[in-house]
Image (cartoon, helix red, strand yellow):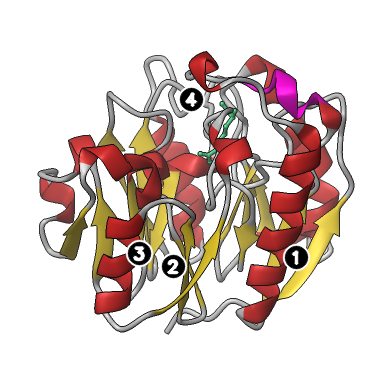
Amino acid sequence: MTKFSHVIIRRPGKSLSNGITSAPELGQPIYERAIEEHYDYEHALEQCGVDVSVLPALEQYPDSCFVEDPAVITRCGAIITNPGADSRNGEKDEIEPAVRRFFDDEHVKHIVSPGTLDGGDVMMVGDHFYVGRSARTNEEGIQILRQFCEILEGWGLEGSEVPLEEVLHLKTGVNYIEDNNMLVSGEFIDKPDFAQYNKIVVPEDEAYGANCIWVNGTVIVAEGYPTVLKAVQDLGYKTLVVDTSEYRKVDGGLSCLSLRF
Ligand code: CIR
């Protein structure tokens, strides 16, 4: 059974306002509010019984509070990714020392160029990892999946590829909350890859709310998505609600803001 004992987060910097966005119409994140939301997020995680390591802001990387992307952490070891956006690629060198506090050399592996991978494209379901093939997770000619899966297989884990077309990352639209329950939205609702799960279909007007996180029996849900919240509560989960509206302005959400392991 999955159980997390550690979480890594990184405070946003003032440069968050320059983060990559597909939704400029939402306006730029307001730093003071983003910090408040980050503290609330940290406190929600603490209530789930995990030890939270807080890394300092990195002004040179506007998107670096989204620590989920430069690393993937499994129960067997960590994979430092090769983030697909040029402005974010250097984040991999910044996250590695934090990850190495928990894993020795043998248990830290790397994705190498020309393969690129963002952790937001990796969804863990027990020992199986779904890997979204997105604009960020890719490789010309050779399959990035092979590189990632060889590392997983070395640890007795496995992966499979899920092509995606409409959203930034796999977990933008599909999230596993344990006990065979999966929140699905948009292009993921009818994907055969997820047919075996109890699917909670997220309505289009609450699509952002599909990005929930399960932490030791509690599901943290973004504020402002009542249908999602009710559906999760109806399944019997304890829930916590956190406002992530400043992060939404730069395409970020609950899962992107932490590494849980
Ligand atoms: C980016 O475009 O990379 C950031 N502005 C948002 C990253 C969100 N990360 C995630 O979904 N895992």
Q: Which amino acid type is marked by label 3?
A: Leu
What is the secondary structure assignment of the residue under circle 3?
helix
> Is 214 situated left or right of 175 in this image?
right
Rendered image: mark on residue 229: 3
Could you tell which of marks 3 and 1 lies nearer the N-terminus?
1
The residue tagged 2 is 156
Quadrant of the image containing the N terminus: bottom left
Which image quadrant shows ligand 1? top right
Give the Cα distance between marks 1 and 4: 26 Å
Q: Which residue is mark 1?
A: 103
Magenta: main secondary structure: helix
Q: Is mark 4 within 8 Å of ligand 1?
A: yes
The C terminus sits in image quarter:
bottom right
Rendered view: 231 above or below 216: above
x%, y% of residue 42?
72, 63
Give the alpha-carbon distance from disc 2 to disc 3, as whole Å.
Answer: 35 Å
Residue sitting at x 53%, y 22%: 26
- Identified at 56% across, 41% down, the residue is 245
Q: Nearer the viewer, residue 182 or 71?
A: 182
Residue 223 in the figure: left or right of residue 45: left
Query: Which of marks 2 and 4 precedes in the sequence?
Result: 4
For badge 4, the amino acid type reads Arg
Question: Marks 4 and 2, how far apart in space?
Answer: 26 Å
* Span shown in magenta: 15-20
Which residue is under mark 4?
Answer: 136
Rendering coords of residue 160 (x, y %): 30, 48
Mark positioned earlier in the residue sequence (1 or 4): 1
- Answer above or below: position of 82 versus 159: above
